[in-house]
Amino acid sequence: MKLRITFLLLAIICTFITRNSLAFDERMRMPSQKRELKPNSMPVNEVPKVMQGVAIKENLGKAVDLNLSFTDQNNKVTTISEMLADGKPIILTLNYYRCSTLCSIQLINFAKSLKELGWRIGKDFKVATISFDPTDKTTDALKKQQEYLNLADQENGNWNFYVGNEDNIKALTQQIGFYYNYDPVSKEFAHAAAIFFITPGAKISSYLYGISYKPRDIKFSLMDASLDKIGSPTDQILLTCFHYNPTTGKYDAFAMGMMRIAALITVFFLFIILGIFFWREKRKKAI
């Protein structure tokens, strides 16, 4: 009788824990919330004219036009469809090659993060940098590719640098939600900084903002973009404890994920305790 009551109580505890802590809402992995990254919080009439309209507006879950085409550093015209043909997610950066300030700082930090990440570019994912300046040339793209692949310590990595015509550039940047302005006085572009993760199905998976990126955030974003097809079992467990926050554009500690892990550990030890209990009862009967 005592044995049955003990078993029943353990079963109730396990059911309660798994229902409340292991429940998973798939919508969390690709949130529908959108946020707008603005240059500052000043009233619009006080923002410099060149900065007005400069923003990143998230289009999470939306697809990029597969027919858009760009020319890489080797003068090869490539469509978005061809970039994704091998079924690997892409980290996309939007920069222009004459920029010696924001773009350079962003790409330097990004290359260093890729080096720290330790994943070979091209094995499970690729990187594409597309210039939004239609006057950039493939020779500029080649120089940038060599510079940043060396910085990432992956001279043979699949990180291509592209140029394009104005129509394709405008179409892509609008689909991504990347808005910028050209200043004819300085002959420079005003723009924000972020990297974008594209799934093999051409959908926008996540945005990481700023000019520097944690290797952990890049790893988790790639895992999400690949639909969990890349990453070790340990990485998958860690991802459970972190959640993409569209407000911050980063991966924050996720209480529900930690509860899931704690619940699994609890259930595991409950079954061990139950096994020991049964073993002792069986041993007593045998004696």
Image (spheres, rainbow, N blue to C red):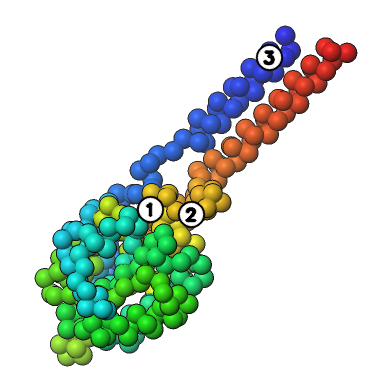
Q: Secondary structure at mark 2?
A: loop
User: As displayed, is residue 83 above or below residue 143?
Assistant: above
Mark 3 or mark 2, which has the lower sequence index? 3
Q: Residue at horizontal 39%, vertical 84%?
A: 147
Residue at which label 2 appears:
231
Q: Looking at this view, name the residue that lies furthest to the bottom.
A: 185
Residue 181 figure quarter: bottom left
User: As displayed, is residue 279 above or below residue 112?
Assistant: above
User: As displayed, is residue 61 above or below residue 83?
Assistant: above
x and y percent of residue 246 in the render?
Answer: 36, 56
x and y percent of residue 142 in the render?
Answer: 30, 82
Point out which mark residue 271 bears.
none
Calculate the distance from the C-alpha at mark 2 to the C-alpha at mark 1.
9 Å
Q: Is residue 1 left or right of residue 287?
A: left
Residue 169 figure quarter: bottom left
Point out which mark residue 5 bears.
3
Mark 3 or mark 1, which has the lower sequence index? 3
Point out which mark residue 226 bears.
1
Check disc 1: other Cα within 10 Å, few if <14, some if 14-19, many if 20+. Answer: many
Q: Is residue 186 left or right of residue 15?
A: left
Q: Is residue 263 left or right of residue 26?
A: right
Q: Residue at horizontal 38%, vertical 77%?
A: 106
- The answer to whether the residue labelled 2 contacts the one labelled 1, judged by CB atoms less than 8 Å apart, is yes
Mark 2 or mark 1, which has the lower sequence index? 1
